[in-house]
Amino acid sequence: MRRKIVAANWKMNGSEGFAKSLISELKVQLSVLDKDVKVVIIPPSLYVAEVKRLVSDAPFAVGIQNVAQWNQGAFTGEISAGMAADVGCEYVLVGHSERRQLFAESDQVVAEKVQQVLKSGLVALVCVGETLAERQAGQAEEVVSRQLQIALQGLASDKWNKIVVAYEPVWAIGTGKTATAEDAQAMHLHMRGVLGSLGAPASDISLLYGGSVKPENARELFGQQDIDGGLIGGASLLADDFASICRAV
Ligand code: PEP
């Protein structure tokens, strides 16, 4: 179902104390948030269970930043999608550009992870986006198309309601540079076309924008017709900024 979503990717930041104080602040600041907006908190894996407990009296969902492409076994250090589901996770980030670039996750691995997430009944928040060199070479749409096609090809028709896509141009992540609202809208519209060609009910899928979203630019980005919310990194660590971004949806 297409809905408005704002997801907080804490990346490798925070602590138990940080989680406690940020969540308690967000509960106050977002107590009157529009019921149609889904807020998803995605802390480091180690704090997922604790954050789940902290949000038990708030309408926030919890996600995990990564899962393995396998379901269980001798994979030291890995966490399966089933384990994430077991501790109450609802969303899984898959294919974040930091995973693709720093941990060499290929499109194929991203596709395998999507399958694991869906098998566990969770929502896959699939991240796609081009690098600066790819954009400058005029390849942005081609790259995003390929990432979507490999990650999501052959999905059964009853699985699309567990897919959310985040367009995150790599050059905008953590850099302070944001895509213009027009460019972001154009890419989101393009993605709906690609999803449609893969057999998805494209107009029912939530598409998020991510990349240096701040309170100052959120309203314009989220005001675009095909942008249903955001995946927020740095600004999600600051209660005032994140709450203000959530209110901008
Ligand atoms: C992200 O990590 O997904 C992200 C969008 O980061 P930032 O908001 O800091 O650019």
Image: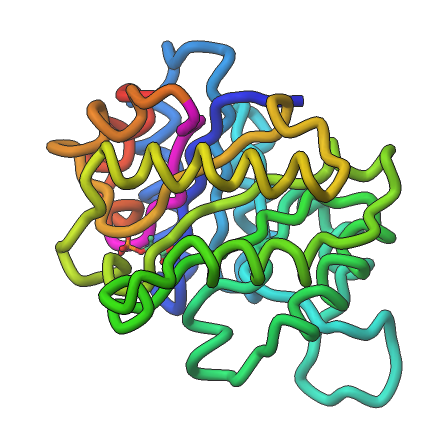
Task: Locate residue 138, reporting x and y percent.
Answer: 30, 61
Tell me how the rendering is colored: rainbow
Whether residue 157 is situated above or below residue 71 in the rendered picture? above
Which corner quadrant of the image does residue 186 belong to?
top left
Which corner quadrant of the image does residue 84 belong to?
bottom right
Q: Nearer the viewer, residue 85 or 47?
A: 85
Q: Nearer the viewer, residue 107 or 9?
A: 107
Task: Locate residue 170, reporting x and y percent.
Answer: 32, 63
Residue drawn at point x = 67 percent, y = 84 percent = 77
Let me know if residue 231 is in the magenta part.
yes
Q: Quadrant of the N terminus?
A: top right
Residue drawn at point x = 86 percent, y = 33 percent = 158
Please report the bounds of the magenta region as a residue range: 226-234
Task: Locate residue 166, reporting x and y percent.
Answer: 47, 46
Q: Nearer the viewer, residue 100 or 9?
A: 100
Q: Is residue 217 left or right of residue 166?
A: left
Whether residue 101 is situated above or below residue 50 in the rendered picture? below
Task: Locate residue 72, reporting x and y percent.
Answer: 87, 75
Residue drawn at point x = 51 percent, y = 83 percent = 103
Q: Nearer the viewer, residue 193 or 78?
A: 193
Q: Quadrant of the C terminus?
A: top left
Let me know if residue 116 is in the magenta part.
no
Residue drawn at point x = 37 percent, y = 34 percent = 24
User: Tag count in the figure?
Assistant: 0
Q: Is residue 176 left or right of residue 33?
A: left
Q: Is residue 217 left or right of residue 188?
A: left
> Where does ligand 1 appear, by image quarter?
bottom left
